[in-house]
Amino acid sequence: MRIFDPHIHMTSRTTDDYEAMAAAGVRAVVEPAFWLGQPRTSVGSFTDYFDALVGWEPFRAGQFGVRHHATIALNPKEANDPRCRPVLDVLPRYLEKDGVVAVGEIGYDSMTPEEDEVFAAQLALAVAHDLPALVHTPHRDKVRGVERSLSVVAESGIEPGRVVLDHLNEVTVKLVRDTGCWLGFSIYPDTKMSPPRMVELLRTYGTERMLVNSAADWGRSDPLLTRATGEAMLLAGFSDDDVDRVLWRNPTEFYGQSGRLDLADDEATEPTFAGNSILRGGS
Ligand SMILES: [Zn+2]
């Protein structure tokens, strides 16, 4: 089973995790820039973090044979802090870097007017830099958060096929399914999605444009839940090809739209992979 985790915060994980992930079949990851918990008080804290996401972390991942890519943005929560707003001015520099495959995580936390502005500004950056966008949907007031996110996405003019709405569940999946956007699901040990719940969603809605991630970070989370979801799919009667589509080809296709995915070796070693010309455009 080859696995591409399209949303995981490796900065907050140990090398033991990399080792276990590699053994479980995780060959590639995307690490979105996010809120670190401790408030950041200056732009310098962000640039050091972004530099780590495009420099140190890919190096660390590489030691375990894992391809590491990043998405860069001012996260929704810190969009509300006036000390962090100037981060928007340094983003264009990062959005040109090789390992950066999308603008993200953007979207809503508490749905404030500040978040509205920063969300729209960053979708415009995605369009200007010809990158996909990773939209985090809020954990509270989820339905309204998803509805509002979809209208901001529509207003921005970005092509829906270049947007993923993440952290969806049984309720919000219905709002996104027919919009042309991609659907992201974060599998957690005890809250949000579990592998059996994810399998039910795949049964109901099919495998097209569906992305499964662990969203593992500093909190209670598990970077091997992508693998557990693949196993649960097989037990439920999905084929190896279905699993490969959800856990490898879908994230590859979505982030491949950046032209910057670097998976050359993995493509060559996987005879069942049908190939995707998008991937060969970049790097
Ligand atoms: Zn995240």
Image: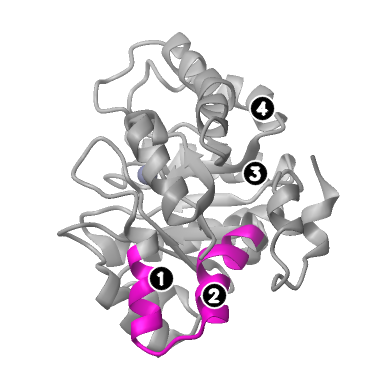
The quarter holding residue 224 reads bottom left
Q: Which is more toward the observer, 45 or 98?
A: 98
Disc marking residue 179: 2
Disc marking residue 107: none
Instruction: Give the mark nearest the N terminus, 2 or 4.
Output: 4
Going 47% across and 63% down the picture, which residue do you hit? 150
Disc 2 versus disc 1: nearer the observer: 1
Disc 4 versus disc 1: nearer the observer: 1
Which span of residues is magenta-colored?
228-252
Looking at the picture, how far across and down is residue 97, in whole percent?
70, 29
At label 1, the amino acid type is Gly
Looking at the picture, how far across and down is residue 58, in whole percent?
56, 30
Q: Secondary structure at mark 3?
A: helix
On the image, numbered disc 3 is attached to which residue?
126
Looking at the picture, how far across and down is residue 165, in whole percent?
46, 60
At label 4, the amino acid type is Pro
